[in-house]
Structure formats: structure tokens, C-alpha cells
Amino acid sequence: MSRDTALVSADWAEKNLETPGVVFVEVDEDTSAYDTGHLPGAIKLDWKTDLQDQVRRDFVNKDQFAALLSERGITNDDTVVLYGGNNNWFAAYAYWYFALYGHREVRLLDGGRKRWELDARPLTSEAVSRPATQYVAQEPDHTIRAFRDEVVAAIGTKNLVDVRSPDEYTGRLLAPAHLPQEQAQRAGHVPTAISVPWSKAANEDGTFKSDQELREIYAAAGLDDSRETIAYCRIGERSSHTWFVLQELLGHRNVKNYDGSWTEYGSLVGVPVALGDEPGKE
Amino acid sequence: MTVSTAAGCAAPDQAAPLPTSLDLEKETVITGVVRDAAGTPVTGAYVRLLDSADEFTAEVVTSPAGQFRFFAAPGTWRLRALSRHGNGDTVITASRGVNEATVPVAVD
């Protein structure tokens, strides 16, 4: 993968709003943002009610995903362009989800809602409906999804990248600072995980830094690209952003996102936890 | 304690009352308004909270009344706002409880 096949610019998006076969999809943390104004023609996916099982803590399965995209009018041949607020955290989560279920042509809009709004590009609150389709999802690709036991086994052997803010990594905060401090039972990080906040990879307008800048950031942080990598954050959305950077922009192989992330790991009984600025020992 | 009741369109709602379950003896809330050069509140501004090493901690979008809110920790923080009316910053030293700040923005 590379920037050309994974990312589109706001200029490209504005020119292709009505292009047949291109479907814009907004995915936000605040699911009401779409209703106040969205890209013309864009549909919405709700990361909680559409993309997560409503009983167990897990994804919707392959059949549920196929039914969802069929109902929203996406075909297997469409180019899906994802965007959202929060610097594309949840759009990147959805991108990883589309990749997991084998969608062929999927892109992220560089800068997401923020760049689009700051540029004063068009937004509309007009309702959008697309005719239903017969979408077929592939088996989930578990080469890009990590589960908790793999994370414990990766301590000291694989690259573990903690992409939360330094205050969450050290254990001073339990959640990003726009949310009340709750969730995991313990604060800290997975021992041996390096700290590379997701925000290092983005400019302040939400667009991604250049490939050269990105390579330098991860090299300086000590990421060994000959090893497998697992990225995690609090609930798996910011780490989707870093997964996107490493695998889709920089073309690293064997990068997994641990979507259980700190809300799972920090509540497990008996696993090692490190506190403070240092990665810590095995 | 409530901050305001104006309807917000940000993520999460920046104008909603603070949750009643919130323990202000423990939480450090940083809240305030983004204002342009004329002092008018700026809606739809992107406000990010940067830590003492200038590292990103969180970001929200201001409400129709220009409000933002963060749940942080005691210490020194920088608030950085981007908007169509220009950009700006302000530094705040926060302690437990509610800390208020104004972020002025102006075209460079």
C-alpha cells in the first residue's frame, strides 16, 4: 500500500463528490455531527451501533457487515472514501474495518472534517439515500487484528506501540482529556511498548505528515521495522490511525491493531503493567 | 455545577452541563470560550489541549457559544485554537476543580 492508493486530498474529494462508483462515508465519535452537515452525497456509519455487536464486546460479524453495507447501498466495486472528525480517528477505525472484511478500494480523506471545515468547503444537511445492494464481505483478515493474548506474548519480542498521549502512557490520565477520566481499572502501559502518540503522525489541521517525516518519527522512536508490530490506544480508534500510517502509508508488513486496547489490557488480572516515561522491562 | 445549556454540535457536546457523577474534588476541568479579535465567540473552532512538552492531549470543536471543555490533570497546559477566523493560543495553569480560560484567535 502507499499514499496514492490509501489517501485522497480534499481537492480530489470535492471534484469527485458526484462521481459514480465513489461513495463518501462519514464516521464520527460524535454521531450527531453528520446530521448538522456532511459532504454532499455522503452517507453515515455509526461506529458504535453499526460497527459493534450490541451484546458482546466485539465487531459485527461478516454477515452483519455485509447486511449493513447492502442496506446503506455500497457495492463491492465502489471506492469508499472515509472521513470524520477527531482527526479521522473513527474514520481510520472504519478504514481498518473495511480492510478487515476485504473491501478492495477504500481511502481516507486527508484532514477529514477539520480540514474540510477550515477550508469552508461545502457541507449539507440534506438526507442521502442510496438504493440497497447485495454486498458480499470476505472472511475477517486476522493478520491486521491483535487479541489480548498476542499482546501479552509480544512483550519484549515484537514492536508494541502505545499511541495514546504521554499522560495516558505514563499513567497520569486514563482517557483522552476531552472525556471524563474513567474506564480501565489500572493506568499505565504494556511493558516494553514505545510511546509514539498518534498525533506525531498528523499536522495540526489533521492532514498526515509526509512519508519522509513519518519514517523519521518511527525510526527515532525505536520502531524496528523488521519485526511485527502491534499498535494500541484506549479503545482501538487512535491506534487504527497509526495502523493506517504504518501499513497503508509506509507499507510496513505485519502491523496489527489491538482494538481491545487499554480498556481491556488495563482491566486484565495478572498481566504486567509499566508506569512512567520508560517502556519498562519484560 | 453547570457551565451552560446552549445546544452544541461538537464531539462531545461542549455546552452540556457537566455530568452530575463528575467529582470536582478529583477532576481537573479546563473550560472556556474562543473569541475573535472583536471579542465575539467563535463557533466551530478546533481547540486542542497540549501538555507541558507541547504534545497533543485532546481536541474538541467549540459549541455555538464558542465553548470548549477538557478533563485534564493539574499542571500547565497550552490551548491552541484553529478556526476560519484565524488561530491562537493561551497557556493555563490548572488545578483540581473548574479552570476557565479564553483563547483569542486572529488572522495571522
Image (tube, coloured by chain):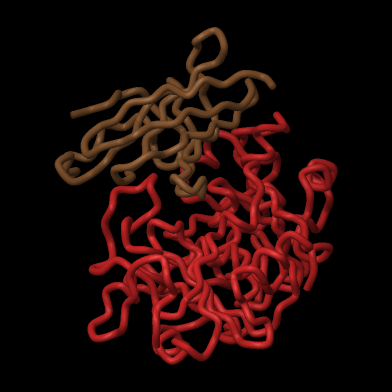
Q: Is residue A162 left or right of residue A267?
A: right
Residue B36 makes an appearance in the image:
yes
Where is the N terminus of chain A found, in terms of image quarters?
A: bottom right
Task: Please tell me which residue is depicted at 77% across the width and 44% down the height of the picture.
Answer: A10
Task: Please tell me which residue is depicted at 69% across the width and 38% down the height of the picture.
Answer: A116
Q: Is residue A168 left or right of residue A257?
A: left
Measured from the top left, where is residue A242 in percent x and y?
Answer: 60, 66
Where is the C terminus of chain A found, in terms of image quarters?
A: bottom left
Measured from the top left, where is residue A18 in percent x and y?
Answer: 81, 45
The chain coloured red in the image:
A
Q: Is residue A44 above or below residue A48?
A: above
Q: Quadrant of residue A166?
A: bottom left
Q: Is residue B86 left or right of residue A259?
A: right
Q: Is residue A92 above or below residue A257?
A: above
Q: Quadrant of residue B72?
A: top left
The chain coloured brown in the image:
B
Measured from the top left, where is residue A72 in percent x and y?
Answer: 60, 58
Q: Is residue A146 above or below residue A95?
A: below
